Image (spheres, helix red, strand yellow):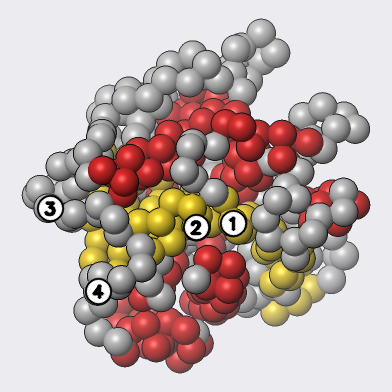
Amino acid sequence: MPLRKPAVSTVAALLLTLSPVLAQAEAEGQGVRTVAYDLGRAAFRTPAMPEPLELTAVVHYPVRRSSRPAPVVLMLHGSWHSCVDEAAWPCTSSAPMPSHRGYDYLGRALAERGIIAVSIAANAIEGQWNRPGGSGPAQPMQPYQARADLINKHLAMWQRLAATGDGELAGRFTDPDTGAAREVDFRGRADLSRVGTLGHSRGGKGIMWQAADRERAKVPAGVRIRAVLPVAPVYFPLVEGDVSDGLVTTAPVRVLVSTCDGAVGEAGRGYVRDALAAGTRYPAAVSTYTGGNHNFFNTRWSPGSGQQHAYDDAPGREENPPLPEGQCREPQSGTVVTQLDEQRQRGRAVDEVIKFFTRALT
């Protein structure tokens, strides 16, 4: 049963109390602005998918323009419902699911630290892949290659915009709430040689695929990936015995896993294990969130948002008898632990994401 949506003031107070980084960001006042762009639901084609993909994103950026261009963090959500009220893609009677807006809290915190944060939508990928019969071996689809191609397309557009002020993004920014046009000059303002990527769930494998050693030649000219942070990522080499589709040894890697993750468990540890085994020269580590679940990293997937389809995936309350509220069972150990609530889990994520990217990019 969905939890009662907490009052905005209550959520804000909890975040300020539980996250020193976010508390400082809020105290600094109106230091961040937010814009969006949507080039259409069929704006980009990749050989990895039979039908085109959307080019849609929300951008949080620092108001103050410094003498040095700002680094960029690109964020990618995972597999979820592609449409608010429909099972098919493209959406015909409802809006696309705003999963990419589920990381606004991270985007604001990054922008307060002088980083441009771009969270992109990937509804078309999963919408095509999850159609009935769509995942069969005869289907010419590779969703993780598609995610990597989508990342590279957005980065290429940003590289051109920052270098020349023109390209596909020029004049395409809007207010994310009203849709009104917003004039923002990003020329010389974004440094695409200092890029970090963050991916959640299947988006985690997507960013590892895009940054993998074997994929380096596909990264757009002028773009350099300097930090990779998968959050509760899936992990499974698509070819048995070959980990190259997610092997990153050319940048620091930090993986966040939760012990009460009812979707993928702690599988993401595999990326760090592979990097260390390959002799990476960069830091590679895992952060473990005891009592954390899978969905709470994305506000739109969490019950507190009131968004359709949101739920708490932590194991325990489906048991007979169910575990008490506030407890969850770790799938890997079977141990019952205190569960992190939405605010505590995201407050910790804010602190860790800020520390990782500011160290690697600024």
Q: Residue 182 carries which label?
A: 3
Q: Quadrant of residue 336?
A: bottom right
Q: Distance between the residues labelled 4 and 3?
A: 17 Å
Instruction: Name the mark nearer the viewer: 3 or 1.
Output: 1
Q: In which quarter of the image is residue 97?
A: top left
Name the residue beneath numbered marker 1.
Answer: 226
Name the residue beneath numbered marker 2.
Answer: 194
What residue type is disc 2 on?
A: Arg
Name the residue furthest top.
138
Give how far across and how far down residue 111 sits, in percent: 36, 69
Q: Earlier in the sequence, mark 4 or mark 1?
A: 4
User: Mark 2 and 1 residues: CB-CB less than 8 Å, in contact?
Assistant: yes
Mark 3 element type: loop
Q: Residue at x 32, y 23 (%)?
A: 42
How many neighbours does mark 3 have within 10 angstroms: few (below 14), some (14-19), or many (20 or more)?
some
Q: Which residue is drawn at 57% across and 50% down?
A: 225
Up-down relation of residue 43 to residue 70 (above or below):
above
Residue 147 appearing in the image? no
Q: Which residue is drawn at 35% across and 56% down?
A: 190
Name the residue beneath numbered marker 4.
Answer: 64
Residue 3 appearing in the image? yes
What residue type is disc 4 on?
A: Arg
Q: Which of marks 4 and 3 is nearer the N terminus?
A: 4
Q: Earlier in the sequence, mark 2 or mark 4?
A: 4
